[in-house]
Every structure is written in C-alpha cells, then in structure tokens.
Amino acid sequence: MELVISVLDINDNAPQFNQLVYSVHLLEDALEGTVLVRVNATDPDLGTYGEVIYEIDNIVPPSISDIFSIDAKSGEIRLTGALDFETVAFYDVQIKATDKGTPPLSGHCKVLVEVLDVNDNAPEVWVTSLSVPVPEDASVGTVVALLSVSDRDSGANGRVRCAVWPAAPFGLVSTFAGSYSLVLREALDRERVSEYEVEVRAEDGGSPSLRGRRGVRVPVSDVNDNAPAFAQAVYTVLARENNAAGAELARLWARDPDEADNGRVRYSVWEGGVSGVASAGRGWRPASSYVSVDAESGRLWALQPLDYEEVQVLQFEVRAEDAGEPPLCGNATVQLFVVDENDNAPALLPAGSGGPGSGASGEAASGPDSGALWAWAAWGAPAGQVVAKIRAVDADSGYNAWLRYELWEPRGKGPFRVGLYSGEAKFSVLGGMTPVRIVLRGAMTWALEGSC
C-alpha cells in the first residue's frame, strides 16, 4: 500500500529583496516620469503567499512624500515631482514588499537617491553698505560700498567671478569669500562727472555660465576746488567824459563751475595792487572813488562824472570771490579809457611882455579893458609885417583842441589879416593904428568861442 503525503504550503516566508540598498544618482533637472530604478523582491511561498506587492514605506526627509512613486506590481520607481539640489540633495526612500498571505509577511530595502547639481542658479549680488555721496576730493582707495555675492549652486557652478563696469574710476577688492569692497581707483572731478551708474557683474563657473548684476548709483559731492575765472584777463572799457553818475560802463562775468555756495560769485573793486590815480591837482585817489561794481551782477558803473582833463586812463582790478570754505578768488584787470568831449573853450594865454612895440612884431599885450589884448604897430608899417602873436590853448585833446583864428572886427577889407592856425596878426596894407578884435574858434563847428 502506497501512502502519499502532500505538504501544504503556509505563508512562512517573507519577501526578500535581491539588494538591501539601491543607490541612484539623479540630475536635479530630471523630468517627471524618469525611472530611477526597479527593485525586485521574491517570496518562495506558493500561490498567493508568494505574490508580492510593492509600496513606499517612508521617505527621508519626510516633508517630501509625493516626489517618488512605485509601481505596486513591477517595483519600478519613478520621479513624480521636481528636484532641487539646493533644497534637498539626498533622499532615503524606504521600500516595502508585502505578500498576500494571512497574516501577510513583508521584506524591506532602501533606495538612496543622490541629487546631482546642475547650473540652474545665477549669482546674486547684494549691497550691504553704501557710503554716498562721495566727495570729489576723496582719496584713491576710499571704500564706497560693501557687497555680498553668492550662488546657490555647488562646485564650479557656484564659483563666482566679479567685475565692475565701467572699469574706471571704481574697482572691486575681494575681502573674503563672497564679500567685496567697491573702492575708488582714480581721482574724481564733479565738474566733469557728477554721478556714476556703476554695475557690479558676477559670473559663475558653470557651463553654460550664468550671470547676475547689481547697479549702484554713486553721486559725487562738490568741494570748493575751482576759483572763479573771468572770461577775459583784461577788459578794455571806453567811457565818454561827463557821463552821468551811475551810468553803466561794462558788465564783467566770472564763471565758477562749482555748485551752491562754492559757485556763488561776488564782485568787488580790489584796491590791493592798484597804484592809484594821479589826478590833476588832487593828489592820489583810489580807483574806488571813480567806479564801483555790483557785487551780484558784476555791473561796472561810474560813481561820478568822469573828466578827461583830470583822468585819461584808469587801471584797476576787479576781484571775483566765491562763497566756499575757504573762499577762492580770481582777478581781472580793467583798463578804463576816458574819451574826450569838447567841453572846454579856448583860453588866451597872457602876454610874455607888454607895452607898445617899436614897429616890430610882438606878442599881444593885455589892454585896459578886461578880456582884451592890445598890440601896437608903427604908422606906415609895410604890408605883411607881424603886428602881434596871439597865443591860446584848449584843455581838450585831439581834434577838440585844434584852434583856428579869425578876425571878428573889422570884417571884410580891413588893414589886418590873421593866420588861420598860427595866430599871427599882420598888415594886409600899409599900416595904421586901427584896433583889431580877433576871435578864436574851436575846430568843431559847434565849438565855444573866446575873443580878444
């Protein structure tokens, strides 16, 4: 008799993975749906006791639980979310395989996922300290700003090079990792450039590289480093004599490119270095007794009517001074030429010797009547003989002082003639004792008259 014993299976074997640890390397820019790995577990039991179901048991860090999925039947693990190396660089995924026995038995393994960095972050530049405005006389090496530079990527992707644009007049100095100082490399001049727009540029070492930038506005403050400068070193001014007091003679202008008080100019007549004016019969007089200058506008005006016979040339300096601290100044020389007017009538000069002559020519002598000059000639003197020499002067100058002489009485065919320019009175016919009145006229047609 043959006895057949059938051994019935029970669920006494738990599923076992062919690896306890699976290691996976995955780029952080991997697309959703990417297969990481397929895990495999076997159960030697028969039937449903040997059928295995896969599931994710736990993920570390636990805050991200939906980034991976596993196929319950095949054990294939896929990416279902976005990776970010800068947030999480390593995952520990616990996998459990469970059979269908009662009670069910399970086996475990883990999948270690290392996220690989890609260059997906541009460098960032931050200004941590800014000292503006910068005085235009700041020394080379002055620190204008402190900057912090960072890149969240790692390795070469996070290694940053920095530069400043434009390259002048500022530069970058690396103080320690990720920190830079923006310093002055060249002297500033606010009158040339009053403000700079500086850009700090950062570039990482990734491939392709990424760039970041940060703009820094650097205004330049003014210092009083420019003295007022006149448009001309020497001003030549013509002024007619007998001008009205307060009449404008000229306008002077000095430019100061500084700003505010440093560029605000005031004018004055400067006595220092002016030798004075030699005025007729008055001794030394300063230029400021004749002219003045408006402190704000630079308008040069006369304090009194000018007299050519007193002053022909007035030379002085005008000073322009700014309101900076300390103040700076500039000077200009003014040469004021007084233009003569015909304001003086001819005047007779007294005779060098008096008394009647003996028939020879002589100077006219003062007569008994005020304002008259007398001359005598011998009876019967020949025609052409000089009876008298009339001498006169005119205090004006140039054409205004040219004199001519004319017979006033008797007119017409008298016995005398007078030289138009010489003033010599002569017989035109045989001489007699007729008194003669001679009139002097200035060269200008409207000139004043004097007579003898």
Image (spheres, rainbow, N blue to C red):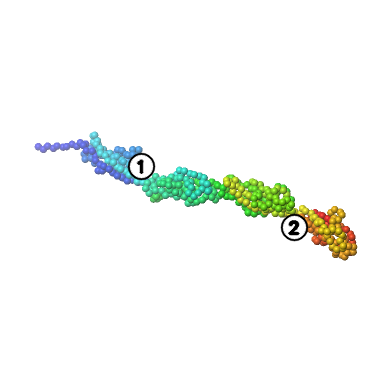
Camera-nearest label, 2 or 1 = 2
First in sequence: mark 2 or mark 1? 1
What residue do we see at 59% from left, 48% from top? 328
Q: Is residue 429 visible?
A: no
Q: Is residue 258 visible?
A: yes
> Which residue is tagged 1?
88
Q: Quadrant of the C terminus?
A: bottom right
Up the image or down, 300 lies above or below 63; here it is below
Report the amino acid beneath label 1.
Answer: Val
| Residue 44 place in picture, x, y as percent | 21, 40
| Residue 98 place in picture, x, y as percent | 26, 38
Q: Return the residue nearer the eye: 324 or 77.
A: 324
Mark 2 and 1 residues: CB-CB less than 8 Å, in contact? Answer: no
- Mark 2 Cα shell of 10 Å, populated few (<14), some (14-19), many (≥20): few
Question: Residue 182 has which mark?
Answer: none
> Which residue is tagged 2?
398
- Label 2 residue SS: helix
Q: Return the residue nearer the eye: 378 or 169.
A: 378
